[in-house]
Image (cartoon, rainbow, N blue to C red):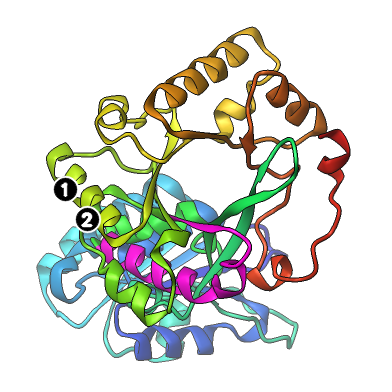
């Protein structure tokens, strides 16, 4: 760190009153302070921010236990120049030994004063008086509760007429990076063992926010395979007064289907509720072709990666093959990733009828779609 640059400090402790209190004190003099409440969120922060200092507990409660020890290995790998200080309420030589063997710069005991913490971190004093703003990564409990989840909706359209078939609900979080994006959010929940709860929360908030869109088209809801048979869809539909026939459950590409028998049973239950099924990202790593043939989903979607290949010989051949397979199954084929008028025109030439992508609309709040219909740019190329 250069003498003139401000430190970026990561605080890691599963006791919010401790982590937040330290962060509030350290953010003085314009320092950037990141707060994480578990080692998984801390690792995500280390990957995203150029952390210069880390102050971490080493013994976490419940199942995380001594995960702080593993975090020390991670910080040395990702941010080898960072100054690392360990704090612990356990006054044990084993703690100090484990810390020292992993290149920790200092060990302090809880509770420690601000003076002791600043001295251990060797924080430079700033001449400025500005107060920094903490970057708080909300813990997994807050995220699966649902109030921080923001569903956005992207239209799925008929290429010829511009008619809206429906809207795919895409989740964002009211949280700083890296938890604001789906990749970071779902990685965090998966590693914390809370992916089913996060899926259930996403479905619930999406159904609630989708109400203005239901008269205009179906709502496509992404569900990861581990959660497929474990979300109480009937109760959520009743609670939000949603007609099941307006809902399509989209099996997410993020997970391979570990138990096809269980997946088929879950899909049978979805249909018994009156909902339809879509298989996402056909042609990608977890495209589940054998399961597709058994289930014969109402919709089959090809991913952004496939859509990006349009106009190349291999890409056109792949799209044509997937379209033929969808027709054989009796599935409506939807091509994602169309971002230009040229891509939309090429898709129509290949016989694609339903599409999704930035050319037709970006993911936005339901209220934006619920306004008066507008003539869009892609209609001119239809």
Q: Are marks 1 and 2 in contact (CB under 8 Å)?
A: yes
Label 1: few (<14), some (14–19) or many (≥20) C-alpha neighbours in 10 Å: few
Residue 376, which numbered label? Answer: none
Q: Is residue 342 visible?
A: yes
Residue with the mark numbered 1: 265
Classify mark 2: residues with Cα within 10 Å, few (<14), some (14-19) or many (20+).
some
Tell me: residue 83, above or below residue 358.
below
| Left or right relative to 244: residue 160 | right
Quarter of the image holding residue 320? Answer: top right
Residue 206 image offset from top left, x and y in percent: 48, 69
Q: Nearer the viewer, residue 232 or 48?
A: 232
Q: Main secondary structure of the magenta part?
A: helix
How far is the residue under mark 1 from the one under mark 2? 6 Å
Q: Residue at x 56, y 20 (%)?
A: 319
Secondary structure of the residue carrying numbered label 2: helix
Which of the labelled discs sits on residue 269, or is there none? 2
> x, y (%) of residue 145?
36, 79
Instruction: Give the residue at x 58% y 83%.
Output: 27
Q: Is residue 203 magenta?
A: yes
Which quarter of the picture shows residue 223?
bottom left
Q: Is residue 141 above or below residue 317?
A: below
Q: Residue at x 36, y 30 (%)?
A: 287
Is residue 82 visible in the rendered image? The answer is no
Residue beneath the point at 35% across and 78% down = 238
* 157 on left or right of 25: right
**Image location of residue 286, percent across then percent down:** 34, 32
Along the viewing direction, whichever of 127 and 309 lies nearer the viewer? 309
Q: Secondary structure at mark 1?
A: helix
Q: Which residues are magenta?
A: 194-221
């Amino acid at each position: 760190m250069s003498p003139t640059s401000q430190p970026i400090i990561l605080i890691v402790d599963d006791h919010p009153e401790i982590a937040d209190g330290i962060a509030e004190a350290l953010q003085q003099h314009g320092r950037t302070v990141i707060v994480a409440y578990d080692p998984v969120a801390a690792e995500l922060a280390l990957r995203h921010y150029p952390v210069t200092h880390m102050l971490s507990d080493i013994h976490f409660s419940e199942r995380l236990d001594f995960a702080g020890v593993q975090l020390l290995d991670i910080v040395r790998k990702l941010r080898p120049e960072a100054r690392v200080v360990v704090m612990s309420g356990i006054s044990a030589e084993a703690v100090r030994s484990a810390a020292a063997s992993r290149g920790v710069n200092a060990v302090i005991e809880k509770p420690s004063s601000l003076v002791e913490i600043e001295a251990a971190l060797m924080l430079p004093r700033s001449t400025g008086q500005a107060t920094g703003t903490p970057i708080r990564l909300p813990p997994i409990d807050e995220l699966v509760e649902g109030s921080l989840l923001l569903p956005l909706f992207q239209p799925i359209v008929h290429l010829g007429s511009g008619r809206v078939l429906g809207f795919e609900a895409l989740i964002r979080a009211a949280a700083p990076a890296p938890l604001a994006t789906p990749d970071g959010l779902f990685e965090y929940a998966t590693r914390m063992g809370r992916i089913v709860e996060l899926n259930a929360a996403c479905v619930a908030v999406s159904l609630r926010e989708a109400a203005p869109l239901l008269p205009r088209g179906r709502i496509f809801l992404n569900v990861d395979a581990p959660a497929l048979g474990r979300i109480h869809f009937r109760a959520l539909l009743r609670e939000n007064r949603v007609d099941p026939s307006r809902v399509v459950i989209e099996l997410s590409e993020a997970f391979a289907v570990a138990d096809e028998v269980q997946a088929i049973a879950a899909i049978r239950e979805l249909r018994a509720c009156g909902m339809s099924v879509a298989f996402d990202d056909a042609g990608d790593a977890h495209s589940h072709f054998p399961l597709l043939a058994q289930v014969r989903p109402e919709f089959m979607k090809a991913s952004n990666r496939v859509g990006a290949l349009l106009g190349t010989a291999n890409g056109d051949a792949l799209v044509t093959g997937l379209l033929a397979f969808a027709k054989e199954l009796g599935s409506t084929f939807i091509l994602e990733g169309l971002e230009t008028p040229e891509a939309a025109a090429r898709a129509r030439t290949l016989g694609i009828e339903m599409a999704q992508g930035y050319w037709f609309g970006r993911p936005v709040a339901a209220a934006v779609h619920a306004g008066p219909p507008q003539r869009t740019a892609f209609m001119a190329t239809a």
